[in-house]
Amino acid sequence: MVQLSESIMIMSSSSLQRCLHEGTITIDPFQPQNLKGGSYTFGLDSEYFELLSERGAIDLRTNQPRLRSRLMTDAGLELEPQSFFVCQTRETVNLNGQYSCLLSGRGSCAQIGLNVLQSSLFVEPGTTQKLRLEISNAGPYNVMIYPGMLVVKGIFVPMSDALVDVPMASSNSSLQIVA
Protein backbone atom coordinates (compact mmCIF):
# COMPACT_ATOMS: atom_id res chain seq x y z
CA MET A 1 0.00 0.00 0.00
CA VAL A 2 1.08 3.56 -0.67
CA GLN A 3 0.71 5.74 2.42
CA LEU A 4 -0.33 9.37 1.76
CA SER A 5 -0.35 10.43 5.41
CA GLU A 6 -0.56 8.77 8.77
CA SER A 7 -4.16 7.71 8.15
CA ILE A 8 -4.91 7.64 4.40
CA MET A 9 -3.62 4.78 2.25
CA ILE A 10 -4.22 3.82 -1.37
CA MET A 11 -4.18 0.12 -2.12
CA SER A 12 -1.51 -1.13 -4.50
CA SER A 13 -2.35 -3.59 -7.28
CA SER A 14 -0.96 -6.48 -5.20
CA SER A 15 -3.14 -5.47 -2.20
CA LEU A 16 -6.20 -5.23 -4.45
CA GLN A 17 -5.42 -8.61 -6.02
CA ARG A 18 -5.18 -10.14 -2.53
CA CYS A 19 -8.61 -8.66 -1.61
CA LEU A 20 -10.08 -9.94 -4.89
CA HIS A 21 -8.67 -13.40 -4.18
CA GLU A 22 -10.02 -13.36 -0.59
CA GLY A 23 -13.41 -12.04 -1.79
CA THR A 24 -13.38 -8.92 0.44
CA ILE A 25 -13.65 -6.87 -2.77
CA THR A 26 -15.21 -8.17 -5.97
CA ILE A 27 -15.17 -6.69 -9.46
CA ASP A 28 -17.31 -8.67 -11.91
CA PRO A 29 -16.32 -9.14 -14.67
CA PHE A 30 -12.70 -8.60 -13.66
CA GLN A 31 -10.28 -7.73 -16.47
CA PRO A 32 -6.64 -8.25 -15.33
CA GLN A 33 -5.33 -5.84 -17.99
CA ASN A 34 -7.36 -3.02 -16.36
CA LEU A 35 -5.46 -3.34 -13.08
CA LYS A 36 -2.80 -0.64 -12.76
CA GLY A 37 -0.26 0.11 -10.00
CA GLY A 38 -2.75 1.96 -7.78
CA SER A 39 -6.10 1.67 -9.54
CA TYR A 40 -8.52 -0.40 -11.61
CA THR A 41 -9.95 1.09 -14.82
CA PHE A 42 -13.67 0.48 -15.39
CA GLY A 43 -15.40 0.18 -18.76
CA LEU A 44 -18.82 1.39 -19.91
CA ASP A 45 -21.80 -0.93 -19.85
CA SER A 46 -24.06 -1.16 -22.90
CA GLU A 47 -27.03 0.04 -20.80
CA TYR A 48 -27.33 3.80 -20.40
CA PHE A 49 -30.10 6.15 -19.32
CA GLU A 50 -31.69 9.18 -20.95
CA LEU A 51 -32.98 11.96 -18.70
CA LEU A 52 -36.67 12.65 -19.38
CA SER A 53 -38.53 15.87 -18.66
CA GLU A 54 -42.20 16.14 -19.49
CA ARG A 55 -42.55 19.81 -18.53
CA GLY A 56 -39.30 21.34 -19.69
CA ALA A 57 -37.68 22.20 -16.36
CA ILE A 58 -36.86 19.60 -13.75
CA ASP A 59 -37.86 20.78 -10.28
CA LEU A 60 -36.31 18.56 -7.61
CA ARG A 61 -38.66 20.02 -4.98
CA THR A 62 -41.72 18.51 -6.64
CA ASN A 63 -40.55 15.39 -8.43
CA GLN A 64 -37.62 13.14 -9.11
CA PRO A 65 -36.19 13.10 -12.61
CA ARG A 66 -37.15 10.11 -14.68
CA LEU A 67 -34.64 8.05 -16.62
CA ARG A 68 -35.33 5.91 -19.68
CA SER A 69 -33.16 2.82 -20.05
CA ARG A 70 -31.51 2.40 -23.47
CA LEU A 71 -29.02 -0.05 -24.94
CA MET A 72 -25.87 1.07 -26.71
CA THR A 73 -24.91 -1.13 -29.65
CA ASP A 74 -21.37 -2.03 -30.65
CA ALA A 75 -21.61 0.86 -33.12
CA GLY A 76 -21.54 3.16 -30.08
CA LEU A 77 -23.39 6.29 -29.08
CA GLU A 78 -22.60 9.68 -30.56
CA LEU A 79 -22.63 12.48 -27.98
CA GLU A 80 -23.30 15.92 -29.40
CA PRO A 81 -21.87 18.98 -27.60
CA GLN A 82 -23.85 19.72 -24.40
CA SER A 83 -25.50 16.27 -24.45
CA PHE A 84 -25.94 14.38 -21.18
CA PHE A 85 -26.53 10.73 -20.33
CA VAL A 86 -26.35 8.63 -17.20
CA CYS A 87 -24.19 5.60 -17.89
CA GLN A 88 -22.81 2.86 -15.70
CA THR A 89 -19.78 0.65 -15.47
CA ARG A 90 -19.90 -2.75 -17.07
CA GLU A 91 -18.41 -4.11 -13.84
CA THR A 92 -20.37 -4.69 -10.66
CA VAL A 93 -18.34 -3.65 -7.62
CA ASN A 94 -18.83 -5.22 -4.19
CA LEU A 95 -17.05 -3.50 -1.29
CA ASN A 96 -17.41 -4.97 2.16
CA GLY A 97 -17.41 -2.56 5.09
CA GLN A 98 -13.60 -2.49 5.22
CA TYR A 99 -13.00 -0.70 1.89
CA SER A 100 -14.17 2.30 -0.09
CA CYS A 101 -13.30 3.50 -3.58
CA LEU A 102 -12.51 6.91 -5.05
CA LEU A 103 -13.33 7.51 -8.72
CA SER A 104 -11.20 9.53 -11.12
CA GLY A 105 -11.99 10.30 -14.75
CA ARG A 106 -9.39 9.32 -17.34
CA GLY A 107 -7.32 12.12 -18.82
CA SER A 108 -7.82 10.75 -22.34
CA CYS A 109 -11.56 11.39 -21.97
CA ALA A 110 -11.22 14.83 -20.35
CA GLN A 111 -8.82 16.00 -23.07
CA ILE A 112 -11.55 15.67 -25.71
CA GLY A 113 -14.22 17.30 -23.52
CA LEU A 114 -15.83 14.11 -22.26
CA ASN A 115 -16.86 14.49 -18.59
CA VAL A 116 -17.59 11.18 -16.92
CA LEU A 117 -18.01 12.27 -13.28
CA GLN A 118 -20.18 15.19 -12.24
CA SER A 119 -21.13 14.19 -8.72
CA SER A 120 -20.15 11.34 -6.43
CA LEU A 121 -16.50 10.48 -6.58
CA PHE A 122 -16.79 8.33 -3.44
CA VAL A 123 -18.06 4.75 -3.48
CA GLU A 124 -19.29 3.85 0.00
CA PRO A 125 -18.22 0.74 1.91
CA GLY A 126 -20.93 -1.90 1.55
CA THR A 127 -21.70 -0.95 -2.07
CA THR A 128 -22.75 -3.79 -4.38
CA GLN A 129 -23.68 -2.40 -7.80
CA LYS A 130 -22.59 -1.11 -11.14
CA LEU A 131 -21.29 2.43 -10.66
CA ARG A 132 -23.38 5.23 -12.16
CA LEU A 133 -21.52 7.83 -14.24
CA GLU A 134 -22.91 11.18 -15.37
CA ILE A 135 -21.47 11.62 -18.86
CA SER A 136 -21.59 14.83 -20.86
CA ASN A 137 -19.79 16.30 -23.84
CA ALA A 138 -18.33 19.69 -22.88
CA GLY A 139 -16.26 19.90 -26.05
CA PRO A 140 -17.10 21.56 -29.38
CA TYR A 141 -17.21 18.31 -31.40
CA ASN A 142 -19.32 15.16 -31.37
CA VAL A 143 -17.72 12.33 -29.38
CA MET A 144 -18.34 8.60 -29.77
CA ILE A 145 -18.57 6.30 -26.75
CA TYR A 146 -18.74 2.52 -26.90
CA PRO A 147 -19.61 -0.42 -24.64
CA GLY A 148 -16.43 -1.49 -22.86
CA MET A 149 -14.70 1.88 -23.40
CA LEU A 150 -12.40 2.57 -20.44
CA VAL A 151 -13.58 5.83 -18.86
CA VAL A 152 -13.01 5.93 -15.09
CA LYS A 153 -10.42 4.67 -12.61
CA GLY A 154 -11.24 3.27 -9.18
CA ILE A 155 -8.73 3.94 -6.42
CA PHE A 156 -9.37 1.59 -3.52
CA VAL A 157 -8.87 2.71 0.06
CA PRO A 158 -9.03 0.67 3.28
CA MET A 159 -11.30 2.25 5.90
CA SER A 160 -9.81 3.26 9.21
CA ASP A 161 -11.09 4.32 12.61
CA ALA A 162 -8.25 6.81 12.83
CA LEU A 163 -8.85 10.53 13.21
CA VAL A 164 -7.72 12.56 10.20
CA ASP A 165 -6.77 16.23 10.62
CA VAL A 166 -7.33 18.15 7.36
CA PRO A 167 -6.14 21.79 7.25
CA MET A 168 -8.71 24.27 5.91
CA ALA A 169 -7.42 26.57 3.17
CA SER A 170 -9.55 29.56 4.16
CA SER A 171 -9.00 29.66 7.93
CA ASN A 172 -6.62 28.78 10.71
CA SER A 173 -8.94 26.07 12.01
CA SER A 174 -9.00 22.50 10.77
CA LEU A 175 -11.72 20.05 9.87
CA GLN A 176 -11.59 16.82 11.80
CA ILE A 177 -12.98 13.77 10.08
CA VAL A 178 -13.77 10.73 12.18
CA ALA A 179 -14.45 7.41 10.47
Image (cartoon, rainbow, N blue to C red):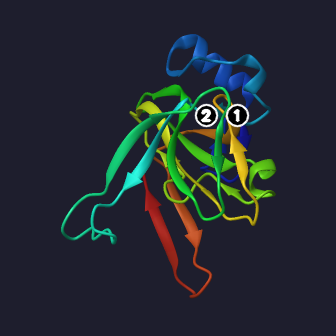
For residue 177, side relative to residue 135 (left or right)? left
Q: In the displayed structure, would residue 98 be above or below residue 56?
A: above
Q: Are marks 2 and 1 in contact (CB under 8 Å)?
A: yes
Residue sitting at x 57%, y 59%: 83
Q: Which one is earlier in the sequence, the residue at label 2 or at label 1?
A: 2
Disc 2 is placed on an element classified as loop
For residue 6, side relative to residue 175 (left or right)? right
Where is residue 4 drawn, in percent x and y?
Answer: 71, 51
Residue underneath mark 1: 149
Residue sitting at x 18%, y 68%: 62
Residue underneath mark 2: 44
Where is residue 33 drawn, in percent x and y?
Answer: 78, 21
**Residue positioned most to the top:** 21
Where is residue 73 drawn, in percent x and y?
Answer: 60, 28
Classed neighbour count for the residue bearing mark 2: other residues with Cα under 10 Å, few (<14), some (14–19), many (≥20): many
For residue 47, side relative to residue 58 (left or right)? right
Could you say which quadrant of the image residue 147 lies in?
A: top right
Q: Amino acid at mark 1?
A: Met
Marking on residue 89: none
Q: Give the distance between the C-alpha atoms of the residues marked 2 and 1, in whole angstroms.
A: 5 Å
Residue sitting at x 81%, y 49%: 108
Q: Nearer the viewer, residue 141 or 20?
A: 141
Classed neighbour count for the residue bearing mark 1: other residues with Cα under 10 Å, few (<14), some (14–19), many (≥20): some
Q: Amino acid at mark 2?
A: Leu
